[in-house]
Image (cartoon, rainbow, N blue to C red):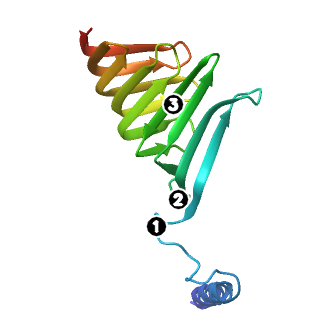
């Protein structure tokens, strides 16, 4: 019986020390509640910014210009408002414009959820319109399951779904291809 009461006393003393330790921590070390952020609001915003992507040799292959870039620290997603995404390859420059884009945490995917307009400086110039486009900058490719419209000179090509190789300047339409010339 004496042994059992000693164990209970030890547990009570341990619990009291734990509560005192927690109270001291909260009072001296913990940040005040006013500094804590609400969910989905912690992060930063840049205005009139430029994001440059480089290859392993340090050469710039892509630039994103935007009037507003918001990075959400909790989800590690970067939202880019009115992005102008430029890709540079030998003698070819691709330019993508949209209302909004998101960049994932490791910057391996740039997603354009709504309409995106793509042009290049190739002669004759080429313009593309699609939506829900995912761009893979390191692989120099883009993909969409949405309708695509391609215009070059007097030729109009449309279809459903696409794979775009930015480096090779190839656009593959996956389904329901229609051409007018």
Residue indicated by mark 2 = 74
Outermost right residue = 57
Query: Image check: 127 left or right of 30?
Result: left
Is 62 rendered above or below residue 42? above
> Is the residue marked by circle 3 packed among few (<14), some (14-19), or many (20+) residues within 10 Å?
many
Q: Is residue 7 visible?
A: no
| Pointers 2 and 3 in contact (C-beta within 8 Å) | no
Position of the C terminus by quadrant: top left
Mark 1 → mark 2, Cα distance in angstroms: 8 Å
Please report the residue visible at 58 percent of the width from the left and 58 percent of the height from the top.
47
Q: Position of residue 100 (x, y in %)?
A: 42, 46
Where is residue 124? Give x, y as percent.
46, 13
Where is residue 71, by image quadrant?
bottom right
At 54% from the left edge and 48% from the top edge, which residue is drawn?
66
Q: In which quarter of the image is residue 154?
A: top left
Q: Which mark is residue 86?
A: none
Residue nearer the viewer, 103 or 124: 124
Mark 2, other Cα within 10 Å: few <14 / some 14–19 / many ≥20: few
Query: Who comes first in sequence, dot 2 or dot 3?
Result: 2
Residue bearing mark 3: 95
101 versus 19 height, above or below: above
Q: What element carries label 1?
A: loop
Position of the N terminus, as image quadrant, is bottom right
Q: Is residue 87 visible?
A: yes
Determine which residue is flagged by label 1.
39
């Amino acid at each position: 019986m004496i042994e059992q009461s000693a164990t209970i006393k030890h547990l009570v003393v341990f619990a009291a020390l734990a509560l005192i330790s927690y109270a001291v921590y909260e009072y001296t070390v913990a940040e005040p509640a006013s500094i804590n952020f609400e969910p989905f609001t912690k992060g930063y915003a840049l205005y009139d910014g430029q994001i440059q992507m480089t290859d392993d040799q340090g050469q710039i292959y892509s630039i994103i210009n935007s009037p507003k870039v918001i990075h959400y620290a909790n989800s590690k997603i970067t939202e880019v408002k009115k992005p102008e995404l430029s890709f540079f390859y030998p003698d070819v420059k691709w330019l993508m414009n949209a209302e909004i884009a998101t960049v994932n945490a490791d910057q391996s995917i740039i997603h354009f959820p709504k309409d995106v307009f793509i042009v290049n400086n190739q002669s004759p110039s080429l313009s593309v319109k699609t939506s829900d486009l995912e761009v893979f900058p390191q692989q120099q490719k883009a993909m969409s399951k949405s309708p695509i419209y391609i215009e070059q000179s007097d030729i109009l090509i449309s279809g459903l779904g696409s794979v775009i190789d930015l480096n090779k300047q190839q656009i593959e339409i996956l389904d329901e291809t229609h051409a007018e010339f």
